[in-house]
Image (cartoon, rainbow, N blue to C red):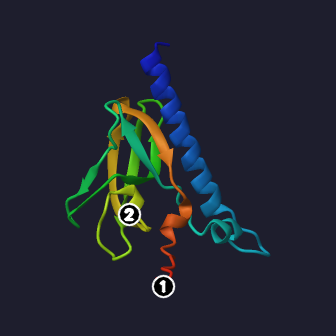
Amino acid sequence: MNSENRKNHFLCEALYDIKALQDVMKDFHSKYFGQLLVKIVGSDTIPFFLITHNGSHLKLMDTVKQFETEFFRIEAIDRERCRGTVSLLRAFDYEGHDTNIISDVVRLEKTSTEKSIELRGISAIQLLKPDMLKGKFIIEPKW
């Protein structure tokens, strides 16, 4: 297996693992505690961004709601063809404006928009904290 195929294999496997973890969080149900894992984590989503071969973040556009994002949730993975289906996560700053600047993001919101992506142009995956989907933040007063 050449290095390009090996890298694609690892990316597909990593996304498959993320999808499996999301499924466990969503589907685990205890007769005593209900959906305890979702309650503990606060979400059924493991957000991430993808880094392309040229070092930039992959950005996709939602043409209906008119926003661009680089934050995603894995919905499905085709390990045979090394393709993934992601849903777009909309990023907001503390004022509620769309942003793609990671240091300004205080909340991610799930959307119903899904895109199929070819993983051959992707070099790396960076996971983000699931609590970014909770949208809870506190602004301390200056005085």
Q: Nearer the viewer, residue 27 or 141?
A: 141
The Cα atoms of the two marked residues, 1 and 2, are separated by 18 Å
Give the left or right position of residue 20, taking residue 103 as reference: right
Q: Residues within 10 Å of mark 1 (few under 14, many from 20)?
A: few
Amino acid type, label 2: Asp
| Residue drawn where x is 47% and y is 41% of the image | 125
Total number of numbered discs in the rendering? 2
Q: How many residues crowd around disc 2 within 10 Å: few (fewer than 14), some, or many (20 or more)?
A: some
- Is 140 rendered above or below residue 132? below
25 or 130, nearer to the observer:
130
Q: Position of residue 53 (x, y in %)?
A: 34, 30
Numbered tag placed on residue 21 in the rendering? none
Q: Earlier in the sequence, mark 1 or mark 2?
A: 2
Q: Which residue is mark 2?
A: 104
Label 2: which secondary element = helix
Q: 95 or 50: nearer the eye?
A: 95
- Splitting the image into 4 quarters, where does residue 27 fall? bottom right
Residue bearing the label numbered 1: 141
Residue at horizontal 48 percent and vertical 85 percent from the top: 141
Query: Could you say which quadrant of the image residue 52 lies in?
Result: top left
Q: Residue at x 31, y 31 (%)?
A: 54
